[in-house]
């Protein structure tokens, strides 16, 4: 990121949790639109020709352009260290991105999930396509306008580079395109706190058929609604198809929680659907889909947290095990078969709220957490000992790695889907950062580079206003989608 003169930036906002939400202005009439700050200033060839013939000598015009370029301060921006002067804002350096697009929606969507598609894995060609689901944050008198949004983002082109001029015209045409947003919506009765998608394989075992895609939305009114969005997704690839009114009806509405919540996760090892939900009372419930398609919630909650449950994560390799993170500063590990409904392991990991958590799907004993004080760390679960028969042990083991680079609360964290050393972190300091735990740098190299206070594991810093949630697009290596108060990126 580099600095440039512009309007002053907005104030930082706190992480979305425990009932705190940003106040949104009235939305535009459009469903949503891409915003390309790198697009051409002039729309047509006539405008370009007219702009070039302005009566001034070429040398004079070139000199003015050079002066304009010098107004941009290309100093690197470091969160919590670089101070923006009045009238300054941040501008991305296009040369550091393979792809970069921004997208605005009528209302902020501060939680979303990426939907796996049938376009293939390990995709590296452009233009790219991404499918996602999101929940809106309409507040106040317009809260009835909230909806579940099903999105298709296509025509996502690669950044143009100087060496691209050497490519053939045919190859350039394939990679350059205008981004397109298509969307379908399902009305919701309340603001969405958190949304997660899950795919169920075809019951016939015929994997040539598409999976059933369902979503679970935790709402501000404490309800959890489950929808089947398969038909909505199919309309993107079948123009002209019409959805029946029944397509927007929930498969189930769970009313087991007495308070709202932000913690939700689908089990990757229960194909038909097993859902965990946690609320601000510290209670966790498990809901299972039966073979007949009904949704059954166990009325006995998992108890043990003394404050709100902020994050839930199923184990990637143990179908009966999950972990929970709480604003009480602890992470607990549970076995759903336990009759006591108490945690098997109870670990104090922070003196502040533990906002977010991610379980590595490559190295199953590694768990990453992010807290309200800006610290995030990685823990080796093999060092966490089970509780004694007398109850909670509240262990305080040392993390495998810990970083206090961010000076504001950590709002999102997620392991790279295939690299067990790379982690993406979102923070209320308006940045999304990438880290590689395998990187080492000795003290002398750090001093020579002038980066003594910057961890060598920090790979990349992306500015994103009030970032709330991020996810890797697993089928497109290196691609991350994030959301914040100003839209998606």
Image (cartoon, helix red, strand yellow):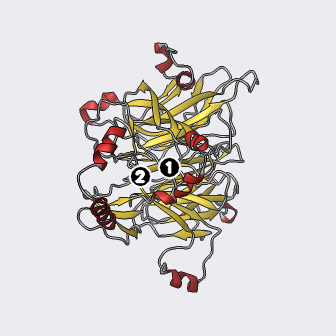
For mark 1, does the 10 Å Cα neighbourhood hold few (<14), some (14 to 19), or many (20 or more) residues? many
Relative image position of residue 415 (x, y in whole percent) = 60, 55
Q: Nearer the viewer, residue 307 or 213?
A: 213
Instruction: Classify mark 2: residues with Cα within 10 Å, few (<14), some (14-19) or many (20+).
Output: many
Under circle 2, the secondary element is strand
* Residue 394 visible from this viewpoint: no
Give above or below for 149 relative to 366. above
Label for residue 145? Answer: none
Count of numbered circles on the image: 2
Q: Position of residue 115 (x, y in %)?
A: 57, 36
Q: Is residue 14 visible?
A: yes
Left or right placement of residue 469 versus residue 146 in this view: right
Q: Which residue is mark 1?
A: 470
Q: Are marks 1 and 2 in contact (CB under 8 Å)?
A: yes
Say which residue label 2 marks. Answer: 467
Given residues 103 and 46, the one toward you in this image is 46
On screen, residue 370 above or below 160: below
* Position of 488 relative to 400 (above/below): above
The image quadrant of residue 103 is top left
Residue 382, position as x, y percentages in the image? 70, 63
Decide if residue 475 is on the left or right side of residue 226: right
């Amino acid at each position: 990121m580099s600095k440039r003169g512009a309007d002053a930036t907005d104030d930082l906002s706190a992480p979305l949790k425990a009932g705190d939400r940003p106040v949104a202005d009235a939305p535009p009439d459009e469903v949503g639109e891409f915003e390309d700050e790198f697009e051409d200033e002039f729309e047509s060839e006539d405008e370009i020709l007219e702009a070039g013939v302005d009566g001034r000598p070429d040398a004079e015009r070139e000199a003015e352009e050079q002066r304009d370029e010098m107004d941009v301060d290309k100093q690197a921006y470091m969160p919590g260290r670089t101070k923006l002067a009045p009238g300054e804002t941040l501008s991305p350096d296009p040369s550091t991105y393979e792809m970069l697009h921004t997208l605005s929606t009528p209302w902020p969507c501060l939680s979303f999930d990426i939907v796996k598609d049938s376009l293939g894995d390990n995709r590296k060609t452009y233009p790219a396509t991404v499918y996602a689901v999101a929940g809106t944050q309409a507040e106040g008198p317009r809260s009835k306008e909230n909806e579940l949004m099903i999105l298709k983002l296509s025509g996502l082109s690669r950044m143009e580079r100087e060496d691209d001029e050497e490519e053939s015209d045919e190859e350039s045409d394939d990679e350059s395109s205008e981004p397109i947003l298509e969307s379908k919506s399902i009305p919701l009765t309340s603001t969405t706190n958190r949304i997660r998608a899950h795919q169920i394989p075809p019951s016939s075992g015929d994997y040539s058929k598409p999976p059933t895609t369902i979503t679970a939305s935790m709402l501000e009114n404490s309800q959890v609604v489950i929808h089947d969005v398969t038909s909505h997704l199919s309309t993107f690839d079948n123009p002209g198809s019409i959805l029946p009114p029944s397509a927007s009806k929930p498969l189930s509405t769970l009313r087991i929680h007495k308070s709202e919540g932000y913690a939700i996760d689908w089990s990757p090892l229960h194909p038909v659907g097993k859902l965990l939900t946690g609320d601000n009372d510290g209670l966790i419930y498990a809901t299972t889909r039966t073979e007949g398609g009904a949704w059954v919630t166990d009325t006995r909650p998992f108890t043990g947290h003394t404050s709100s449950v902020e994050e839930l994560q199923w184990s990637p390799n143990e179908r009966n095990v999950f972990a929970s993170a709480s604003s009480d500063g602890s992470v607990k590990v549970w076995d759903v078969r336990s009759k006591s409904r108490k945690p098997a392991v109870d670990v104090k990991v922070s003196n502040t709220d533990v906002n977010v958590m991610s379980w590595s799907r490559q190295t199953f004993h590694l768990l990453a957490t992010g807290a309200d004080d800006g610290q995030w760390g990685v823990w080796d679960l093999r060092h966490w000992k089970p509780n004694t028969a007398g109850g909670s042990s509240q262990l305080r083991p040392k993390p495998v790695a810990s970083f206090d680079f961010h000076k504001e609360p950590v709002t999102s964290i997620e392991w790279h889907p295939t690299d067990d050393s790379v982690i993406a972190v979102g923070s209320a300091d308006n940045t999304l950062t990438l880290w590689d735990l395998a990187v080492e740098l000795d003290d002398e190299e750090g001093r020579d580079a002038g980066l003594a206070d910057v961890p060598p594991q920090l790979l990349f810093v992306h500015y994103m206003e009030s970032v709330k949630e991020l996810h890797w697009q697993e089928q497109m290596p290196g691609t991350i989608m994030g959301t914040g108060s100003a839209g998606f990126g």
